[in-house]
Image (cartoon, coloured by chain):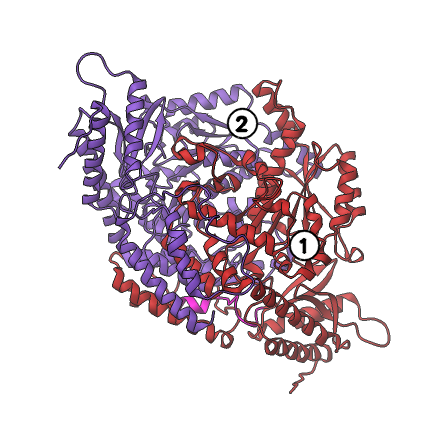
Chain colours: A purple, B red
Amino acid sequence: MDSREFKEAATSSIDEIINYFETLGSRNVVSTVEPGYLRKLLPSEAPEEGEPWSAIRADVEAKIMPGITHWTHPGFHAFFPCATSYPSMLGELYSSALSGACFNWICSPAVTELETIVLDWLARALGLPACYLSTGPTRGGGVIQGSASEAVLTAMVAARDKYLRETVPESGLAEEEREERVMVKRSRMVALATTLTHSSARKAALILGVRFRAIPVREEDGYRLRKEALAAALAECRAQGLEPFFLVATMGTTDVCSVDDFEGISEALAEHVAPDQPGEVWVHVDAAYAGAALVCPEVRQSARIDLIERFHSFDMNMHKWLLVNFDASCFFVRNRDWLTKALSVNQAVYGNKASDGGLVTDYREWQIPLGRRFRSLKIWFVMRSYGIKGMQQHIRRTSQLGEEFAAALRARPDLFEIVTGPSFALTVFRVAAKSGEEPTPEEERNALTKALYERANASGKIWLTSTNLDGKFAIRLMTGVRTTERQHVETAVKLLTEIAQEVITGKPVYLN
Amino acid sequence: MDSREFKEAATSSIDEIINYFETLGSRNVVSTVEPGYLRKLLPSEAPEEGEPWSAIRADVEAKIMPGITHWTHPGFHAFFPCATSYPSMLGELYSSALSGACFNWICSPAVTELETIVLDWLARALGLPACYLSTGPTRGGGVIQGSASEAVLTAMVAARDKYLRETVPESGLAEEEREERVMVKRSRMVALATTLTHSSARKAALILGVRFRAIPVREEDGYRLRKEALAAALAECRAQGLEPFFLVATMGTTDVCSVDDFEGISEALAEHVAPDQPGEVWVHVDAAYAGAALVCPEVRQSARIDLIERFHSFDMNMHKWLLVNFDASCFFVRNRDWLTKALSVNQAVYGNKASDGGLVTDYREWQIPLGRRFRSLKIWFVMRSYGIKGMQQHIRRTSQLGEEFAAALRARPDLFEIVTGPSFALTVFRVAAKSGEEPTPEEERNALTKALYERANASGKIWLTSTNLDGKFAIRLMTGVRTTERQHVETAVKLLTEIAQEVITGKPVYLN
């Protein structure tokens, strides 16, 4: 493909992408293809001879699009959002042109320096404590990871390394003896989370090969980790001869968007090992989705984000609720030396004057992989194109849609019961208990709620996901997608109301 | 940014990108900015109000481009290449528009199914044994990872899990007792590699918290891991009560592009634990760069790629030498159950009919992160646009440039000595020993070679990297970049010849 062909191909692709976004609402949200559909449509081997763009282009609409689930569709209310926006796409376009494996500063100084700068911009925009700024008092800073899973894994690796450095003497032992001591210590270490923490915490512990304990949090806790539960878990570990070294605290749990009690957590930990003392527990705050809402000052206070200066790392995904396309997981740490000490592995071929002189940041030492893409460009484009006000407006507008959705459910207590929320544009609800006489048995309510859920999704107009809270089947509806407007929420309410009436009465109902 | 503004912005961006590639050769290869240059040029906070594209666009050329090191520059001879191409960029463009966190099949069936299909295409194009095909006899298959580092980490996690399943009884033990047994076993397990294995292997072991041993390979081995060295390492581990469970074998080492002796490795391992028996050592083949050359049948035979059917996993980066932009690390495994057993972590919110029915692939169980981008699209576009023949031509043409470069050095034995290669378009060389009298001391040759290296890089016209082989400082020159033509290699030869003469004689020399 030469320059002329590329210009033609890219120009027509841009037209098709614009048309895609402008007509998105008319498609089914979720793909309806059957497993294995694509293998029937494509040859089993790559072509011997190159093909013209016209042939490839035709296949995108004919063969790929039917298999796409549309995460930017206004009726996408499932999981959490996965964003994209025009400025973000321009960032990816430039990034793919400037492709490089930018593991060291010299591999493209702009890739490293823009990342440091825009993550400082973001830390300020979110109101994070100064200790998370690269220019702050504690040698903190941010780095872009691929996903919140990689961020929690990276934090856990650094935490294990910090704990071992603090609790196994580095000097005075022969290398082999220290390796033995470290191995024994490792077998006693335990990472903590809660039963509502994202599964990435368990996966990280599995990868590290450390023990993992999920502290139960339930409805009566407001689905939050509180001081008493954490203190009890710490005491239990000590009684079993285990050594807690890491805790994931969550701002916006996947199931219900609850926020753990940061104050209670820091108090319980201080009673276990005093802050900044050897053997303290590293606290990683997973704010993958809800962290975006911190661009609004009113959210910072209610989440007590000031308290994370007592913690060690914080992560949020701009690619969820903050208009940047996947991947842009923004990971901040209070002291970057914790990362570089844990993750530096040198090889002669990567030596260069700037790195050896210690004047620059080499982000390969802040992450699991070696190479990295130019991901800060799309963040920079989005933050400049929207401005702080534009980002705030997006969060407030979609949060307000969540309020309106919940209000509509509350107006029909005969049909719906809100289990949690709206919290960060997420409402969790189920079919109401029948009024009068004795309450509907839980099993029946689960079955009715499941029927409502499945029939709503079968409509193709909206996509919802479900959860299970201590045996209660519940539906999650999230209104954080950029394209979702009031009219789409009204459509969802009407659809759910109709189906709920049918499900409860056993008769079809049509609303105007 | 509305559709009209996006169309304008994208159209002008495409023109600028085409212009970038057409004038690339006139830029310095490596950025010459000073550390911290960008912070002086940008504000310390994001703007309150959104900015127009014209302001952002102007900053790309004025502030970002001076900080870019150009990996697609024809004079880029450093490290290994990091590719991009027009069809690949179109793939990224569509991928950013269709942004989604495609962890499960239902999250976009096309994302999963196209990945399975194009990785089968690639396995066939590379001539991998049938056991690495998704349709093959052993439940094999491929998955796109972000980098070779993530591939080796994923393989090591799966290998550890497989080894523990095979060597610690799963039944007949209480859960706590088994956890204890596993912890003790883990502390005895050791991952093996060589002194020329990429540093990602050591980093993976560090992340897993398992022991790591690098087997020395030296000049007299042809810089390859051979049977005797591996057998000795295995015996040493046994003598120390350690249990080897994982080995990285390399096709194309970073320093010299050597290929480990696959036959010798499989023989040594068979004598340790018989193949497919409990406790066998998992062999992961890291072919990150040189694996691309397997599109040429003549390479398959010399590398004995047929023997990898005795091994367990294989990884190569299309984003290095095969025309796809970063990231596209293609990771194949002989039995995908090894991955899913090690990496499955369930959470209620991710449940869905297709996954629960077991009819589909959920790639989240094949990788470290949960979410994933639509990366197969760019691979599909590149393979179709180039065809098998186009890819072969690219590999043969750039390999031939390596031959021509090495021939030019050989023609000047008074100036240069080739240490290794050309091997996969990589030549490693140093300043020749002085003829006559007694040989130049090694230290002096190192100093002369380093002077040659630094002055060549200071020219700005080419970028070379260096290595250190058992105390010998040597220069690496790689000719695998898509834009590199014969004339650019001739320029490099002329430059190196001039500088080498100056360095050796102490006088400036100008060649016509």
Q: Nearer the viewer, residue B362 or B452?
A: B362
Residue at 51% from the left image edge and 42% from the top image edge: B368
Range of magenta residues = B62-76
Which secondary structure is most common in the magenta stretch? loop
Q: Chain of mark 2?
A: A
Q: Say what secondary structure mark 2 lies in.
A: strand
Q: Quadrant of residue A230?
A: top left
Question: In the orientation shown, which residue stands out farthest toward the bottom?
Answer: B512
The answer to whether residue A377 shows anywhere in this view is: no
Amino acid carrying label 1: it is: Met
Q: CA distance from mark 2 to mark 1?
A: 42 Å
State which mark lies toward you, 2 or 1. Answer: 1
Amino acid carrying label 2: it is: Glu
Question: In the orientation shown, which residue stands out farthest toward the left?
Answer: A512
Q: Which numbered circle lies on residue A243?
A: 2
Q: Which residue is mark 1?
A: B251
Check the image and report above or below for B350 versus A329: above
Position of the C terminus of chain A, as image quadrant, is: top left
Q: Say what secondary structure mark 1 lies in.
A: loop
> How busy is the neighbourhood of tag 1: few (under 14 within 10 Å), some, or many (20 plus)?
many
